[in-house]
Image: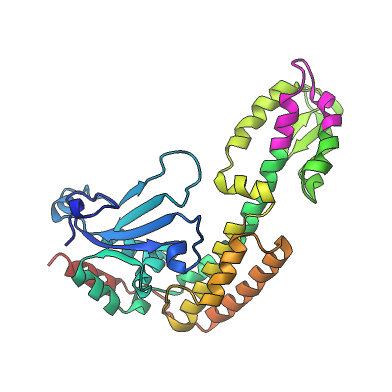
Amino acid sequence: MTTADQNPYIDTGEHPLLYLAKSGSHLFGTDTPSSDLDIKGLFLPTKSSLYLQNSPRQFSNNSNLSDQKNTKEDTDVTVWSLQFWLELLQKGDQNAISLLFSWTHPGAVLQADPRFLERLKSLEPGRLLSRKLNGMIGFVASQAVRYTDKGKHYRALKLVVDVLENAPLEAKIQDTLQELFQRAPLELFEGWENMLYVREKEEHSHRAEGVFWILVVVGKMYDYNAGAKWALESLKPELNKYGKRALLASQSGVDFKAFSHSLRVLEEIRVLHRTGTLEYPHPLEFAKYLTSVKLGEFGYEALVASLEERLALTEAAAQNSVLPLEFDVQYAQDFLLEWYK
C-alpha cells in the first residue's frame, strides 16, 4: 500500500492510502483553463486506531491558505476512510458516488494500491447504491435558484449598508430613503421591490400605539425613526453571513456554477436510475454544454427552463429505476473486511 512519504498530495500518517483520483471538473470533463484541481481519495484506518476508537474519518489539504477563491494553481484534496465512504454511499452522497466511478476516466486515477484499484473495478455498483438518490432530486434542482436568490439578497443588503455608511452620524433611517430609492432602480435587479420597500405597521403595546412607517430590508424591519448608524450595525452581520457563492451570484445576478452543478447531478441521477452505473468524463456534447453554463453563456430564464426539463427527465427515470430499494449493507461490510484480513 502507498505510504504517506510517497504521496505528494496529502499525508495520512500511519493510515495506508488506498486510492487517489481527480474529482470535480477535471473528472467530469468540464474543466477550463482557470479550474483548480479537486482530488478525492480513500485510506484504511489502522486496526489500532479502530481498537482505540480514535480512527479518523477524513484528511483534507487545500493549497490555498487565503480567504480568496481557488485558482488554477490550487489543489484541494479530501480523502475519506473506507468506512466513512461506504456510509456516504449508503446515504446517496453524490461526491462519494463520483469517486466510486472515477476509475472509468482514463486519466483520473493519480495513485492507487494496485489490488484496491482492481477490486474497485470489479465491484457491483448496483449493490452500493439505492433509490435514496430520489431524495436528492428536488434538493439539487433548488440549489441554483437558491444561490441566485442569495446573490440578490446580498446585493440589496449591500446597497442599504452603503447608503447607511454614508449617512451623517445623527441621521435617522427616514433621512436616507431618498438616496436609497434613487439608487435602487439603477443598481439592483428586476423585482428588487420585493426585497426593499416601505410599508405601514400597526402597533398596540405598552410602549407604542398607532401606525408607524417602516423600512423592510430582505425581511428585516426598521422603524423610520431609528438611527441610521444603529440600523447599520444590525445589517452588517447579516451581510457577512453570505458565502462566496452568493457573492459571485451578486456580481452577475445568477450563480452559473450552481446551475452547472445542478444540471450535471440531475443527469447523473437520471443515468444511474436507467443503467445503475456511470462513466467519466461525461459525453463530449453534454460536457461542453455544462462548461458553457458555467461560463455564463446562457440567461437565467433559459437555465431555469433547462433545469425544469432535466428534472422531469430524471423524475421519469426514477419511476422505472434499475436500482434496488435498499443499499446492500452485507455486501459493503464484506468488502470492508477484505482489507483487514
Q: Position of residue 322 (x, y in %)?
A: 45, 83
Horizontal side, residue 260 vs residue 47: left or right: right
Q: Which residue is at a point 79% across and 33% down the rendered structure image?
A: 215
Q: Is residue 217 above or below residue 321?
A: above
Horizontal side, residue 210 vs residue 102: left or right: right
Horizontal side, residue 178 vs residue 90: left or right: right
> In terms of image quadrants, where is residue 115?
bottom left
Q: Position of residue 63 (x, y in %)?
A: 37, 45
- Quadrant in which the C terminus is drawn: bottom left
Q: Is residue 331 above or below residue 19?
A: below
The magenta stretch spans residue 325: no
The magenta stretch spans residue 170: yes
> From this viewpoint, is residue 214 visible?
yes
Question: Seen from this angle, which residue lies furthest top?
Answer: 170
> From this viewpoint, is residue 141 visible?
no
Specify how the rendered protein is coloured.
rainbow
Q: Which residue is at a point 37% across and 62% down the rendered structure image?
A: 22
Horizontal side, residue 201 vs residue 47: left or right: right
Is 214 in front, or is 341? 341
- Quadrant in which the N terminus is drawn: bottom left
Q: Position of residue 152 (x, y in %)?
A: 70, 47
User: Which segment is the magenta one?
Assistant: 158-179
Is 320 in front, or is 312? 312
> In terms of image quadrants, where is residue 314?
bottom right
> In terms of image quadrants, where is residue 225?
top right
Main secondary structure found in the magenta portion: helix
Q: Is residue 58 above or below residue 264?
A: above
